[in-house]
Image (spheres, rainbow, N blue to C red):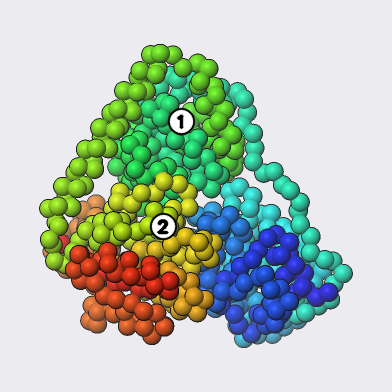
Amino acid sequence: MRGIQVFLDSLKAYGVNSIFGNPGTTENPLLDNLADYPNLNYYVALHEGVAVGAASFYAQASGITGVANLHVAPGLGNAIGMMYGALKANSPIIVTAGQQDNRMIHRAPILGHDLVGMAAPVTKWSVQPQSADDVSATMREAFRIANEPPMGPVFVALPINVMEQETELAATVSGDLYLNHDAAPEGIALITDLLLGASNPAIIAGDDVAVSGACAQLVKLAETIGAAVFYEGLHAQVSFPSRHPNNKGRIAFEAGNMRRQLGGFDLILLTDGSFFEEIWFDEGSPVPEGAKVIQIGNSVRGLAQRVPLELGVLGNLPSTLEKILSGLGDRISDDFIVAAGERNAGLQSGWNDMSDARIGSLKRQWDADPMTPARALHEIAEVVPDDVVIVDESITASIEVGLGFNFEAPGDYFGGRGGGIGQGLAGVIGVKVACPERPVVAISGDGSAMYSIQALWTAVHHQLPIVFIILSNREYRVLKHNLDTYRQRFDVQSNRPYPHMDLTGPTLNFVDMAKGMGMEGIRVEKAEDVGAALESGLASGNPYLIEVVVSGKV
């Protein structure tokens, strides 16, 4: 058998059924042999970043290892930004790139470069098999590392001559690997003691709650102890129901604001993720003085990564939370039940006040022209089906997305990690492939959309019925906010305009762009027309684009 057969047999053995790729000459062995693997679907992207973004979100939505197929050095270079996002999201994906014949390594061939070195900084492991005999072991190790907590991308370069070499070493798998650790009983007992002794506990829920299937246990724990629940500032999934009264929204991006959000809590439980990610420097810790921090982690690397802990416990989240709940159940006193009930009642009251304030703000801007992003999102939330999946890259409107939509469980929402833009339109391709039976809607800002606009063609080419909603404010609004913050933080006195942050002259026309890629679309300027446009798009059964004109930064 040849190296390419071993590679494809490895994908099959690990349950892979989808490849997202942008092929080139060195990928001919793969493309030419796909016909022998009818259950392996190849989704063509017109840019390598789209392929990796789709593979990353596919892995998040399906629970199956994602695979992206790129082309030599320029193709890998085009995809590095999305690979960074996959690394930050802990997406288990294998990124491959065809490599030039390794017998030409000293001849500096066209398009050749050190692919392993290029990919190493944004992957868990980067490797190139040197012969067909290496392929089986390389792929077995690649799948193991990609799925080993913390999960993440692996890169494999595939020299064209290695793919064509003969080998007797067939594809193999690692077997059933139980990688989740049972938490130490003494660690669970100590966490239980701390929770029972807390007068005002809080929880910060990481994406791993959703990935590991621990949402139900986390909700029960929050209700049992009367804890406020925050989620990460940038999050890929839903780890706590968006409309639960204990939900306090996302953590800020500056240590000072984090301290203010967490002020008054004497115990903070981190359920694993990437916590306290900052944009701007502030002096001091994100944790208020006197508060104890405890963490349940699924890998040693993540424990105590950014803040010192009172206690860190390594363990599988669902089983660890179940054992904590069991331990609490044996020891909860009447006084504790009363105190937890009072905290829950206070959280419910705060939730009601926040909802009233949001509705009041929405009403005050109800007739704004152009409509505000909040009004547009309200109209969208009013008509989406109950089983809709939202892929969000609205950036400055993301808080409104979190408040306005009912995300009850993992799988209802997907977002990008790492802060790089363009992930939404690329990622929704993978989400729809993973969720063919559910309606899928992508919400993106116009600036973000232009980073991966080629994804529209992929949706049409493969007839993926996705509704793409572009909130068009004709500017990089987030950059304007950040420029204001920069001037304030560094005491820059300026009345200058915002430089190079407007998307005008010419104004982008997304309906025409969609039409050029074979997609029907409509431009909506009146808020009362948004719902009907979305209903038409969903009913069409085809890929559909809605450009919604919204107000920019005032």
Give the label on residue 376, or none.
none
Numbered circles on residues, count? 2
Disc 2 target residue: 388
Q: Nearer the viewer, residue 47 or 282?
A: 47
Image coordinates for residue 209, horizontal then vertical, percent: 50, 43
Q: CA distance from mark 1 to mark 2?
A: 27 Å
Badge 1 marks a residue whose secondary structure is helix
Q: Nearer the viewer, residue 542 or 318?
A: 542
Residue 268 shows in the view: no
Q: Vertically, is 372 above or below 356?
A: below
User: Which mark is first along the chain, 2 or 1?
Assistant: 1
Of the 4 image quadrants, the one containing the C terminus is bottom left
Residue drawn at x 28%, y 28% is 346
The kind of residue on which mark 1 rests is Leu
Image side of residue 251 versus residue 331, left or right: left
Give the label on residue 221, or none.
1
Residue ranking furthest to the right: 168
Image coordinates for residue 414, horizontal then vertical, percent: 44, 56
Q: Vertically, is 520 above or below 147?
A: below
Residue drawn at x 39%, y 63% is 441
Image side of residue 147 versus residue 418, left or right: right
The kind of residue on which mark 2 rests is Val
- Image quadrant of residue 524? bottom left
Residue 495 shows in the view: yes
Of the 4 image quadrants, the one containing the N terminus is bottom right
Q: Nearer the viewer, residue 171 or 95?
A: 171
Residue drawn at x 53%, y 32% is 321
